[in-house]
Image: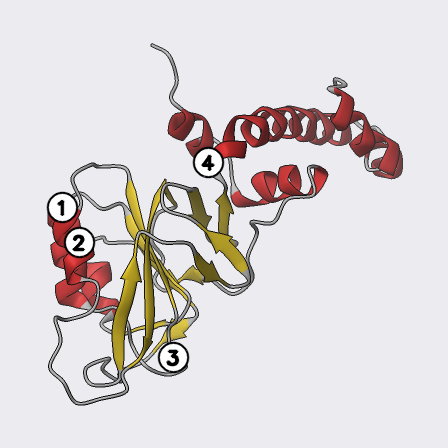
Amino acid sequence: MIDTLLDRLARLDTGTVSDALDFLALAGATVGLRPLWNGPRVVGRASTVQLGPKTDSTPTVHLITPVIASIASDDRVLVIAGGIDGVSCWGDILANAAQVKGVRGTVIDGFSRDIEANEAIGYPVYGRGATMVSARNRVVQLASGTAVKVAGVTVREGDYVIADRCGTVFVAQDRIVEVLDLAERIARRQDGMVQAVRAGRSVEDVMHDQEFEAIKVGGRP
């Protein structure tokens, strides 16, 4: 069976993908967007949501619900930007609805409530932290399917997402093949370096900068 791009990404970790982005001088690695419960890693394609402060008292559809309702594939990760410090933009009802629609997880540049409820159904949620403060009458959805800024990284609809205990990394869809090719080379070389150290080779030699530079030209460990 031919591996899909998501299959290939799922065999990596955020550190290796971040290293590949570094070698290619590409943005994508973030700081602070970590699992809010001890859940599984998430790999998928971004469905973007832009939030912002509510500025009037007009009743609105609850944020993010239209995006969840419109999802029609099983490869989606909700990527939510525009959260307000200390205010939730994710909760248990949204998590249940997303899980029913086959969403793989949620990454929030902000805060979530109902962490135990997300854990109870096994729904992965990544973000800056937990809170109990409701989004209702505080935060609204401004847009979806558009480019958003998440922890300083521009994320577009359909970009690739990988998140694990170290954090969250985004890869632009038009660079994913290049990034995967390099990340797989990095993973192979790092595996070889571990084996070399365990076999008794000096770690000083194994981790010399020239060993890492060799990755750029596809050198073998």
Identify the image quadrant of the C terminus.
top right
Q: Of the residues tagged 3 and 4, which is closer to the observer? A: 4
Mark before the other along the chain sequence, 4 or 2: 2
Mark nearest the camera among 4 and 1 is: 4
What secondary structure is found at the residue carrying circle 4? helix
Residue on which the image places disc 1: 101
Q: Distance between the residues labelled 3 and 4?
A: 28 Å
First-in-chain label (3 vs 1): 3
**Label 4 is placed on what type of residue?**
Gln
Tag 4 near tag 1, CB within 8 Å: no
Q: Are marks 3 and 1 in contact (CB under 8 Å)?
A: no
Three-letter amino acid code at the position of disc 1: Lys
Residue located at (29% from left, 62% from top): 143
Label 2, label 1: how far apart the Cα atoms are: 7 Å
Quadrant housing residue 136: bottom left
Where in the figure is residue 215, as x and y percent of width and height? 75, 27
Identified by mark 3, the residue type is: Ile
Q: Mark 2 points at which residue?
A: 68
